[in-house]
Structure formats: C-alpha cells, structure tokens
Image: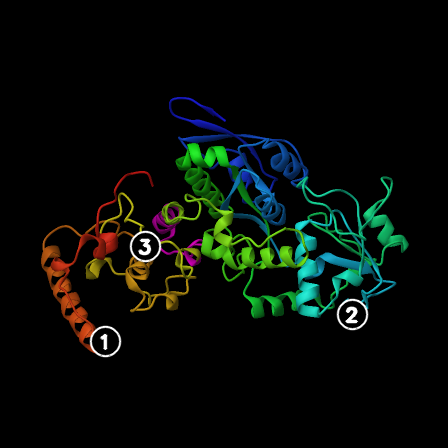
Amino acid sequence: MSVDTHVTTLSAAFDDYPHTLPLKRGEIASPRVAFTFSDIRPANRFFKPMVRELKFDVSEMAIATYVQAKAYGKPLVLVPATVMGRFQHGTILCNAARPLAPAELAGKRVGVRSYSQTTAVWVRGILENDYGIDLGKVRWVTFEDGHVAEYHEPAGVERAGAEKNLLKMLREGELDAAIYGADLPNDPTLTSLIPHAEAAAQTWYARHHVVPINHMVVVTEKIAKSNPQTVEEIYRLLLRAKAAAGLPKAGAIDFLPFGLEACRPALQTIITYALQQRLIPRKIEVDDLFDDTTRAGSLGVRHLAASIDFARATLMSTGSIAHPLLPEIQQSGESLGETHRPAGVRSARGAAHRADLGRGMELPCRLGGFSRRGGARDGRALRLVRWLVRPAGRDARPQGQGCAQDHEQDHEHDHEKGKSRAQEEGCGFRPNAERSTADRGFDRQPESDAL
C-alpha cells in the first residue's frame, strides 16, 4: 500500500469477470483509492500467497479458504462483497458411458483439485445433508494441498501423482467422478452425477434460500485497522462495478450478493459444512468473519449511495428505473438504521414528490418486506425507494406559484393519515414537528459528504 496526499494505492488480485473488469479497466474509479492489479491467473493461484504471505492489500478469495484462514488466526478481514457464486449441483461429473448416482458413491473414487476447495465443500455438504451420503465411505483423490498451511487432509485421502490429470483420469476410468471449480469442462462425454442438476439446484434453492457463494473479497487486517475509510471505498467501488455490469439481470437470482445480511445464509451454511467435514477446528460465528467496519452500517451507507448514483442516472436518461441493486437495500436485517439522506437528495415529502407505484414504473424490489410496523429502519429504506422511483424531472422540491400551498395541503393530509393509523394500531401519535431528528430519518441532513 502506498499513500500520497490524496490517493491510497492498493495492491489487488481479482480474476476477470464482467463485474470486475469495469474496475480493472478504470471505468469505475475513485479520487481516494487506486489499485495495482496482479496478473496472476486463475484466481485459485493467488489465494495461497494471500493467505500465507499477505501478498496483496485486497483480493478475491474462496470463501472456504477464508473460513479456514479465520479459524487459524490469519490477519485477514472479510468484506461482504461476492465476486463469484453459482449453483453447485452440476459441478460433480461422471463419465456418461459409466453413469453414477449419488446413492452409488460408497467405495467409488472421486477426484478434486484440493480437498478444501470451496466447490468441493459445497458439493460434499449437499451430498451429505440432502442426499444422505456417508462421505467417509467415498475414496477421495486430490492433486494439491489446500491454501491454508496449518490444515491437513483427513486420513485416507489419496494424493494423485504429479503426472496425473483430473480430466484424463475421469475419461479413462481411473476416477469414477470428479468435482470441478471454475474449470468445469464442457465435454459431451461427461454428465452430472446428480440427476437433472439444474432442476435439483432450483429445488435446493427453494428449500434452503441460500445462494452458494464461491468467492468473496478480503483485505488485510492492517488495512482494515489503519484505514477503515479505504475499506468502505473498496466496497463502494465493487458495488458500482457490479451495477455497471448490469447485474443481477431483471428477474434473475442474484449470485453476487452484497451486504452482511444478504451473504449471511450462505456464510452460515458454508461454516456448517466446513465443521461437518473437519475443515476447521472449531465453530465460527458469521459475525466473527468481519470486523467492526465491514459488519457495521457504514457499508450500508456506501451500498445505498451507489444505488442512488445508478438510479438517478437511469431516471435522468430513461424516465423509469429497473435498478439491479434495489432488491439488496431492503434485505431483512440490513444495517439501514444509521443511514442518512445522501447529500443532494431533497426531501421526498409532498404529493409532487411521491412515486406513483401504479404507473408502470419498473421496480424489481420486494416492497412487501417493508411493514408499517417495521420501525424506523424500514421506514427510511422505503422512503428512499419511493424517492428513487419518483417520476423523472422531479429531482427537486417544486418551485413557483401554488407549490407552497400544495405542499402544505399534502402535509396536513399526512398529519391526519398518520393520526388515523395510530388510532387504528393503538399506538401514540406525534405530529411531525414534535418528532425528533432521528425519527425523521431521511428528512435530516447528512452528517458529511463522505457518501
């Protein structure tokens, strides 16, 4: 890491994806943070030097590797930003000429690059927990050590010779099945061991509500402690790069969740699987994977700010919005309670500023998640969403003759509506003038322009 008066330059390692290339090509940039990107490829080749040598300031990292690293006390901190995720059911293959089913795995030889490879952890967890497979009865064959030096493979795991090749062994029958990571082969002679893998994955997702995360982002503990604002900026840049790539597509599952609560189900699941498979010596809590900066609401502020930047640009150019990040800002439990109205965002109060959600505006956001009884956090988030989808051309409070009167009439309408609702729900009601600044949420001014 190098720092001059204005810009902090970080050494970084990321593979090439549609959502990292905008950052790597300089299309997404920051006046405060710059990157020197490593040319090591593929990603699994820079995980080991990051874990063992802290070679970079920030890097992509396989989540199973990070969970192990944290369990063994490595000075790394997780950032709640996903770089790679996918369904895993189709990553364990067998020879189509010798088809195999999960129930037939006992005594069979299954190859995998490394026993602690993240894809293998997901696949073994699915086989054990959803198909009832006794993993101890499978003959595992590996080709290299894991990334964390302190970890050793279980007894009975066989190491293939240096001259051996995973794909060739599978094709020639030396292996009955093989698990593949990013190098999943497109080979018509191979077939998924799990029947109807895509449908099985959709069923699994519907049952567990988990997006299987492969890679997330880590920073060194030194960076996290000495410059937490830099970590927040990294998060914001990654989020902007994801938006620039147009991800997730409308109506599609988001395999790149951002934010602690969006990532929590997958993190809890991978920790459970790692413990079951004896990849870690002790249980770890999800919150322990982060530090005070990366688990706190300050990243939520960056998340919302990036959403606003994209949404405002979309509104100005199209007059409507189908913003890929909006579904994430209302994840249940997301740290929105401390979010302020960003600089430049006017109050959304007033009839002329309310979004007409019934006029065909595209909003891929589960507004049902915001209940009237959801508290101040949900109220602020909902008001932000309403502001984001307001009709184009209404960026500021209306000016001119009659506007003040319209606003006053609308304010009186809100007052009476709030009083009626309070009476219906059996709770107290205070006019807006009597409410505290904290109660008003987005109506208060931001504490700084750091957004």
Q: CA distance from mark 3 to mark 1?
A: 23 Å
Task: Give the image quarter of residue 411.
Answer: bottom left
Whether residue 342 is visible, yes or no, is yes
x, y percent for residue 216: 56, 46
Category of crowding for the residue at label 3, using alpha-carbon neighbours closer than 10 angstroms: few (below 14), some (14–19), many (at least 20): some
Q: CA distance from mark 2 to mark 3?
A: 48 Å
Residue at figure coordinates x 74%, y 58% from the top left? 92
As helix, strand or loop, the secondary structure at mark 3 comes to loop
As helix, strand or loop, the secondary structure at mark 2 comes to helix
Q: Which residues are magenta?
A: 307-327
The residue identified by callout 2 is 103
The residue identified by callout 1 is 425
* Mark closest to the chain's N terminus, 2 or 1: 2
Whether residue 212 is visible, yes or no, is no
Q: Amino acid at mark 2?
A: Ala
Task: Give the image quarter of residue 129.
Answer: bottom right
x, y percent for residue 402: 10, 57
Total numbered circles: 3
* Mark closest to the chain's N terminus, 2 or 3: 2
Q: Main secondary structure of the magenta part?
A: helix
Give the number of the disc on residue 337: 3
* Mark closest to the chain's N terminus, 3 or 1: 3
- Within the magenta stretch, is there residue 195? no
Seen in the picture, residue 192 relative to 296 is either above or below; the reply is below
As helix, strand or loop, the secondary structure at mark 1 comes to helix
Residue at figure coordinates x 51%, y 54% from the top left? 285
